[in-house]
Image: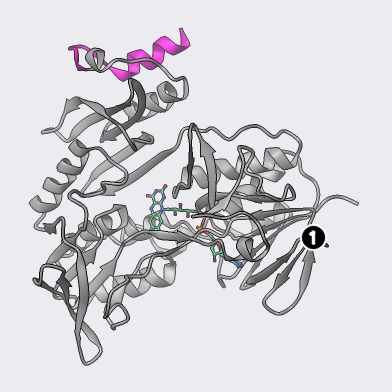
Amino acid sequence: MSERVVIVGAGHAGISTAFELREAGFAGPVVVLDQAGHEPYERPPLSKAWLAGAVSTGELAFRGPEVYARRRIELRTGVRVSAIDRGPREVVTADGARLPYDHLVLATGARPRALPVPGAGLAGVHRLHTLADALALRAALDGARALAIVGGGFIGLEVAAAARKRGVPTTVVEAAPRLMRRVVSEPVSAFYHRLHEEAGCVIRTEAAVGALTGEDGHVTGVRLADGATVPADMVVAGIGVVPETGLAGAAGLATGDGVLVDEALRTSDPAVFAVGDCARFPLGEAMVRLESVQNAADQGRAVAAAITGDARPYRDVPWFWTDQHGCKLQIAGIATGADEWAVVGDVQERRFTVLCWRRGALVAGESVNRPADHLALRRLIAAKASISPAAARAGGFTLKDHARSLAG
Ligand SMILES: Cc1cc2nc3c(=O)[nH]c(=O)nc-3n(C[C@H](O)[C@H](O)[C@H](O)COP(=O)(O)OP(=O)(O)OC[C@H]3O[C@@H](n4cnc5c(N)ncnc54)[C@H](O)[C@@H]3O)c2cc1C
């Protein structure tokens, strides 16, 4: 009897795992279960091209239904897994059915963090995680008179850009001293701050939200901790996500801001893996949890390799992107804890790269409208290339030349 893989979650991570299993030659049954009642789709365009009207809803689907059938991937949508019974190796679905597995892959993703303030449940308060959220948000934007966005991270700022494009008066309220602080260096924060202000967006940093105000059950504004109120008939909360660890935790697997996994993405039970937004894994000296398509897709490939007997430590260089006001930011590596940086290129021309070092090692690079730099950086960081800040600041420096010299 061939082994069966059951995957919980049909997002980027779950679907990548399924297809990569077939690529790796896995011949047994592959079953993907998802509580959502529709075909798997891409989330990134929801806050970018789709919201701007440049991509249709039909174009969001990962693949046509016939492709799943052709690769013998059994996709069951509208099925919520309510428990894992690790003794007999079975998952239990909400209707009480039991499905046996030899290998189980948790790809349950994350859910948006709820605004922890009074008024968060008022009508007119939106979040953006699913297609249903996006449809509601886009419809509301059409009639919005004043939009307040709580959270100056990727999603909040992408929505701000789309709203300004439609002419909606928009204010971004961010508790930290600068935009996207968790993920980018100071020069990049400052660049995007200016860009949004130039597009007519009001940005309020170091502004903690105390409550949402309302009238007749509908939101009327955002009251800040300092007592000021930002009037708004529409609010979008973009304050991050919380990993979906409920199933794993209830089954006695180790969790802690994510399902804890080892370098091969195995949980504390070797028959169970976790991938994508829900997984917390070792990367260098730290345990990290990443929320990106690259991470979800590459971890799917790594787990497929492990299941087919080719387990290797997952050490892929993380990369991320965002699109705001036509300025595409691509990030290679993780800049957390960086203590030095250098700017290469021309900030005024909106084409530059910020290189980030931590304790003398190049750890990340953030490229604005410089895709070739981004590709070079992914190679350089993977190779642990040594580039000094002084060399990067010298005239004539190019990342492409350095990446080329790796091959030589
Ligand atoms: C608006 C938006 C824009 C984004 N933009 C970018 C971007 O530009 N670049 C980038 O790299 N990343 C972006 N991301 C993040 C990226 O989409 C996620 O990192 C990625 O989708 C994670 O994939 P995943 O498979 O781990 O989780 P998810 O895509 O969240 O999928 C998890 C799935 O598991 C299902 N599930 C959970 N629990 C159960 C259960 N008990 N039973 C059955 N099914 C269950 C859920 O229904 C869900 O479909 C964006 C995200 C959003 C929301």
> Is residue 394 magenta-colored?
yes
Is 97 left, or right, of 246 in this rendering? right
Q: Which residues are magenta?
A: 393-408
Q: Measured along the vertical axis of the image, is residue 339 above or below residue 177?
A: above
**Ligand 1 contact, mark 1 (Cβ < 8 Å):** no
Q: Secondary structure at mark 1?
A: loop
Is residue 20 or residue 270 the one in the foreground?
270
Residue 326 placement (x, y as % from top left) = 22, 46
Instruction: Identify the image quadrant of residue 159.
Output: bottom left
Three-letter amino acid code of the residue under disc 1: Arg
Furthest toward the right, the residue is 1
Is 391 left, or right, of 82 in this rendering? left
Furthest toward the bottom, the residue is 216
Tell me which secondary structure the magenta stretch mostly adopts: helix
Marker count (numbered):
1
Which residue is at 23% across, 86% downward?
Answer: 218
Q: Measured along the vertical axis of the image, is residue 126 above or below residue 184?
A: below
Residue 284 placement (x, y as % from top left) = 49, 31
Crowd band around label 1 with a 10 angstrom C-alpha radius: few (<14), some (14–19), many (20+): some
Which residue is at 25% across, 26% downward?
Answer: 340
Q: Measured along the vertical axis of the image, is residue 127 above or below residue 329?
A: below
Instruction: Identify the image quadrant of residue 134.
Output: bottom left
Is 29 left, or right, of 79 in this rendering? right
Is residue 229 or residue 55 the one in the foreground?
229
Instruction: Identify the image quadrant of residue 72.
Output: bottom right
Residue 34 placement (x, y as % from top left) = 61, 66
Which residue is at 54% across, 38% downward?
Answer: 282
Which residue is at 54% across, 32% downward?
Answer: 315
Which residue carries the number 1 mark?
A: 89
> Is residue 217 magenta-colored?
no
Residue 102 placement (x, y as % from top left) = 80, 53
